[in-house]
Image (spheres, coloured by chain):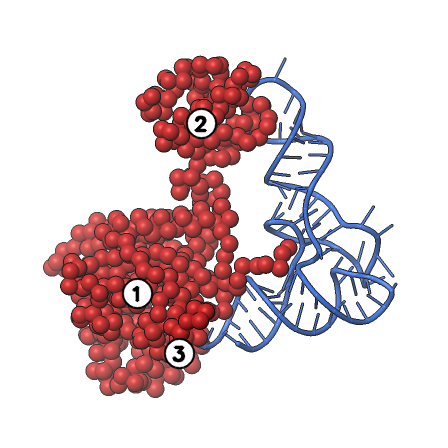
Chain colours: A red, B blue
Amino acid sequence: MSDFQAPKGTRDFYPADAARRRFITESWRSASIRHGFEEVDGPIFEHLDLYTVKSGEGIVSELFSFQRAGGEKDYALRPEFTPTLARLYAARAGSLPKPTRWFTAGPFFRAEKPQRGRLREFLQWNADILGDASPAADAEIIATCVSLLSSLGLTSKDVRVKVNHRAALSAWLLSRNVQPEAQAELFKLLDAKGKMPAPEFAQKVSAFGFSAEQAEVFQKGLVRITVPAGIDPSKAVVDPFKPPAIDPSVRDVLDLTYFSDAVMPLAKELVAAGIIDWIDFDLSIVRGLAYYTGMVFEVHEATGAERAIAGGGRYDNLVELFDGPATPAVGFGMGDVVLGLVLEDRGLMPKEIDLFRRIGATPDVFVIPGPAPESELLVKPLLARLRAAGRHARASSKSTRNVGKLLKDANDQGARIAMIIESKETVALKDLATGEQSQPMLVAEAFARLGIRL
RNA sequence: GUGGCCAUAGCUCAGUUGGUUAGAGCACGAGGUUGUGAUCCUCGGGGUCGCGGGUUCGAGUCCCGUUGGCCACCCCA
C-alpha cells in the first residue's frame, strides 16, 4: 500500500462507485425535471465573505478556505449552495420569471470530522422555488423531495417527512408569553430532546410554563393531521368543505391555534399532492439555522437509524441579505451519503451489473466470433458499424474461442443481445435475457432487426 | 476539535506464549472439457502485514508516535 491516500473524509470512485454516484445524481435530476425545475450551477469555490455574511465568522472553522499563493483574497470551497443561489438570483432578479424554480447537484465541502453519513466531500442536491410565498410552493418543494424518494423505491413506511412551521410556532409561543430569547432556548431543547431522559426533558420544558401533560406532547413531537374519512390521499382528491384537522387530543392539550392557522393550508396542499401519508407534523423539528422563516422540514429514515436524509424550509429574507430584492423562497438540500446508506439499509441500491444497467452503461450488442477461422477478423468491423449506428457494442477481451465462455462474458457485462458470427456473411442474434437465438441471417437483416438501417 | 475502538491480498477473514519462505475463500488472469450462459478440474499473478520508530537473537504478533476508518460528543448551513 502506498503512502498516498485520499484525504480524510473524501472518497475514490472506482467503476461501481462512480455508477452508484451516477445512479443517485440521475435520480435527482429526473425528479427535478419531472417537477419543472431548471438546472443551475455556480463555482465550486466562492469568496469567503459569501459564507460569513450569512453565518458569521464562526463558520470559518467548518470551511476549507484558502488564498492563492501570492494572492490576498480569501476563498472557500462551497459548503452549501444557498448563498450561491441567492447571489445568482439577486444578480438577475428583475428578468427572472416568478416563481423561479431552480435545482443543482454537485460536490460540496465541509471541514468536519468524518463519521457515518458525514464526509468532508459529498454531493448535494438542492431544489428551490423563489418568488412564491404560497403554501403551494412549500408543498411543491416537499413533493419534489418525496418524488425522488419514491422513485428510488422508498415508501412512506421507510422514511418520514417531518414538518414544522417556525413562524407559527413562534407566534403561538409568544401568545403564551415565551419571549424570542427563551424561544431560541426552547428550540435547542426540542432539538436535543432525543438525547436526554424523558423526565429531564419534562422538567426543562416546565421551565417554559408547560404542564407535565403538555411536556409529554412535546416529547412525542408529533401533531397528527387528520384527513377526513372517505378521502384517499393517493388519489389527490380534496374536498374543500372537509379540510384536514389537527388531532383533537393534541390540540386540546396545547391549544395550537396559531400553528393550525399556518399549517392547515399546507396540509391541504399536501393532501392535494397525494403525499400526506409521508408527513408527520412534528413540533420538535426546528433546524439549526436561524434564517428559516416559515415551514421547515427534515426527512428521516423511519426508525431513526441514520442522520437526516434531507432538510429544508422557507427562507424569505435571504435573497435580500445578498443585495437582491425582497424575495420569498423555499427549498431543500439532500446529500448523497445518507441517502446511499438508507438505500443500502433497505436493500434498494442496485447491485453490480444491475447498477450499470440502471444507468445505461451496459452493452446493447456483444459480438462473439464463431469457429470459422475468419470470424475473428469480422469482429472489429461489426463493432465499428454498430458503434457508427450509435449502439453500445462490445466484444470479449478473453482469448478463448469457447462460445459458452464468451456468452458468459457477454452476460457478465450485462449485454442485452449477443451477435454470434456464423460465417463471412451471416450472424445469429441471441437475446441474453430470454435465451432465444435466431437462425443465422445476413448481417444487413440482423442490423435491421436491431433497428439499424444500413 | 475531544475521547474510545480498529487497520493482514481488490473483497471477507485466519494467523498458536513473539519463532522457518504469512494463508484460505471469493474476485482476477491462463489453460482444459468438440459451438451456447451452470457446475467442474489444473495452473498463475498478486502482500516491505497502513506508515515510522522502539524493545528483542527474532515482531503480522509487544510498546510509542503518525495516518486513515468506525463510534460517541461538539457541530450540523
Q: Are marks 2 and 3 in contact (CB under 8 Å)?
A: no
What is the x, y in percent for residue B28? 60, 38
Q: Quadrant of residue A321?
A: bottom left
Q: For the C terminus of chain A, give its image quadrant.
A: top left
**Subunit bearing disc 2:** A
Evaluate whether residue A305 shows in this view.
no
Judged left or right of residue A97, residue B70 is right
Where A429 falls versus A328 (above or below)? Answer: above
Where does label 2 land, which residue? A383
Residues A425 and A340: in front is A425
Where B48 falls versus A405 (above or below)? Answer: below
Name the kind of residue labelled 3 in the image.
Answer: Gly
Judged left or right of residue A117, residue A371 is right
What is the x, y in percent for residue A76? 40, 69
What is the x, y in percent for residue A389? 36, 28
For marks 3 and 1 on the same chain, the one whose residue lies earlier in the sequence: 3
Residues A313 and B77: in front is B77
Dot 3: element? helix
Where does label 3 land, which residue? A58
Q: Quadrant of residue A303?
A: bottom left
Identify the residue at horizontal 34%, vertical 82% (top origin): A185
**Subunit bearing disc 1:** A
Task: Compute the Cα span from label 2 to label 3.
Answer: 58 Å
Identify the residue at horizontal 46%, vertical 64% (top origin): A120
Residue A84 tag number: 1
Task: Compute the Cα span from label 3 to label 1.
Answer: 19 Å
Name the kind of residue labelled 1 in the image.
Answer: Thr
Judge depth for marks 3 and 1 and give the one in front: 1
Q: Are marks 2 and 1 on the same chain?
A: yes
What is the x, y in percent for residue A236? 20, 51
